[in-house]
């Protein structure tokens, strides 16, 4: 219920005690300001770390061949494990729950040319799904498709840095043109952008793995198998990896616990570690911020105790004229809520404003970028302000409600 008299009385009280009200509100404003600033800084750190994970699906798994380090079934250590197309097919048919899957062949840097322009670029044969696993953005044309694989087509998808090196001037549009890869002509069907922080990823050339095996290798060897785990939980993703290792261990006769026979990079696990780390950081920030706010609330509560003491006679007169205990409680709590909410809102606005200024003026660094306080934080801070004000005024209000009118009227 809106009562103009109460608001006028609160305004009159604040006006009479400007310095006291300012100092009381400042502690609350500072607490909210620091909370928003800390949360925004934590967000900036998290955004910076997320940037490091770009250039590959966060639910991706990469399995590469290696050398055995454990004796197994009479076989010596140091055996080289060489994956083949059969390994890829076995993993593809035996593992359930994956979203995308691809094999890769590492052919290293190759001399690639177009007319008089040339350069050394990394040749990376793969299956069509690898474009999704690597989260490539096609800026022109398309990525490799299944028909390219089945028909052994000589097509190539090049990175933006390959395009800028080989295709200039009148030939700046590479689509449909033929590049020379180690003496073999491949038709350019797409240009991609890789968001990985490693600039060399833009210097790759992807071609169908079936074509590469026939043209450059003459055999069915592959170097890596990668897949994404879709919406699988952490436990389900671990089971997929365990099943893949089991299939490969059986085909190549090595101990499934031999971590050097095959190398597994589980990006799911890395992401989980960082999520847990930043959950801890956010919890720490909230503890520090809440501690600062509580200090401000205690200050407001103490001031409201003084206000109650100063207005003891006034409260006694109100009660003697028929004011209910609840009306006294409501008056004191309303004043406390107004002071904390207004001061806290100022701190909230200043905190968000400073974060916006930092975000615009400060250039992104490797591990810190775009500090921000999202809408949910603002809502949580607003609710916190109201609760803080209510708590700050509760105990003084209860004390005021218990004032004995007779005793209060004798108060000097």
Image (tube, rainbow, N blue to C red):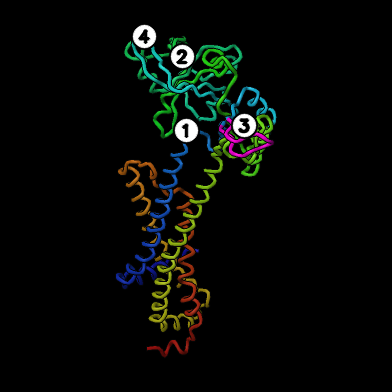
Report, in whole angstroms, how far the alpha carbon at label 1 lies from the one at label 3.
17 Å
Residue 97 visible? The answer is no
Of 393 and 352, nearer the camera is 352
* Highlighted magenta segment, given as a residue range: 66-79
Residue underneath mark 1: 55
Q: Is residue 216 above or below residue 59?
A: above
| Marked residue nearer the N-terminal end (4 or 1) | 1
Report, in whole angstroms, how far the alpha carbon at label 2 lies from the one at label 4.
14 Å
Q: Are marks 4 and 1 in contact (CB under 8 Å)?
A: no
Q: Which mark is residue 115?
A: 4
Of 146 and 8, nearer the camera is 146
Residue underneath mark 3: 99
Q: Is residue 315 left or right of residue 11?
A: right
* Residue 209 pos. (x, y %): 55, 19
Residue underneath mark 2: 188
Q: Are marks 1 and 2 in contact (CB under 8 Å)?
A: no
């Amino acid at each position: 219920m809106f009562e103009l008299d109460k608001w006028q009385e609160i305004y009159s009280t604040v006006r009479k005690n400007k310095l006291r009200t300012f100092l009381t509100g400042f502690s609350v404003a500072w607490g909210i300001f620091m909370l928003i600033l800390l949360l925004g800084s934590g967000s900036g750190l998290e955004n910076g770390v997320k940037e490091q994970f770009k250039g590959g699906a966060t639910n991706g798994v990469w399995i590469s061949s290696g050398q055995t380090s454990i004796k197994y079934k009479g076989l010596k250590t140091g055996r080289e494990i060489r994956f083949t197309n059969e390994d890829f097919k076995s993993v593809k048919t035996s593992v359930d729950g994956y979203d995308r899957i691809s094999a890769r062949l590492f052919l290293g840097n190759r001399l690639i040319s177009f007319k008089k322009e040339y350069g050394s670029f990394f040749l990376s044969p793969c299956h069509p799904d690898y474009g999704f696993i690597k989260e490539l953005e096609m800026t022109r044309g398309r990525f490799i498709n299944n028909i390219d694989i089945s028909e052994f087509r000589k097509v190539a998808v090049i990175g933006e840095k390959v395009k800028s090196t080989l295709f200039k001037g009148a030939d700046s549009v590479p689509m449909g043109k033929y590049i020379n890869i180690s003496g073999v002509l491949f038709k350019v069907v797409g240009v991609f952008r890789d968001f990985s922080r490693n600039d060399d990823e833009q210097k790759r050339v992807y071609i169908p793995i079936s074509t590469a095996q026939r043209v450059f290798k003459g055999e069915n060897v592959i170097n890596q198998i990668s897949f994404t785990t879709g919406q699988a939980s952490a436990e389900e993703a671990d089971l997929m990896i365990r099943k893949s290792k089991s299939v490969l261990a059986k085909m190549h006769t090595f101990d499934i616990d031999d971590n050097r026979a095959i190398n597994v990079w589980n990006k799911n696990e890395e992401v989980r570690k960082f999520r847990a780390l930043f959950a801890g950081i956010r919890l720490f920030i909230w503890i520090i911020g809440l501690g600062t706010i509580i200090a401000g609330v205690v200050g407001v509560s103490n001031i409201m105790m003084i206000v109650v003491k100063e207005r003891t006679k006034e409260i006694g007169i109100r009660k003697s004229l028929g004011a209910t205990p609840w009306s006294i409680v409501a008056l004191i709590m309303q004043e406390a809520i107004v002071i904390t909410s207004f001061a806290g809102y100022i701190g909230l606005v200043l905190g968000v404003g400073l974060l916006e200024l930092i975000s615009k003026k400060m250039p992104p660094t490797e591990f810190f970028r775009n500090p921000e306080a999202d809408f949910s934080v603002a809502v949580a801070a607003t609710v916190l302000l109201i609760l803080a004000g209510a708590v700050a005024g509760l105990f003084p209000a209860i004390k005021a409600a218990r004032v004995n009118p007779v005793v209060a009227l004798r108060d000097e």
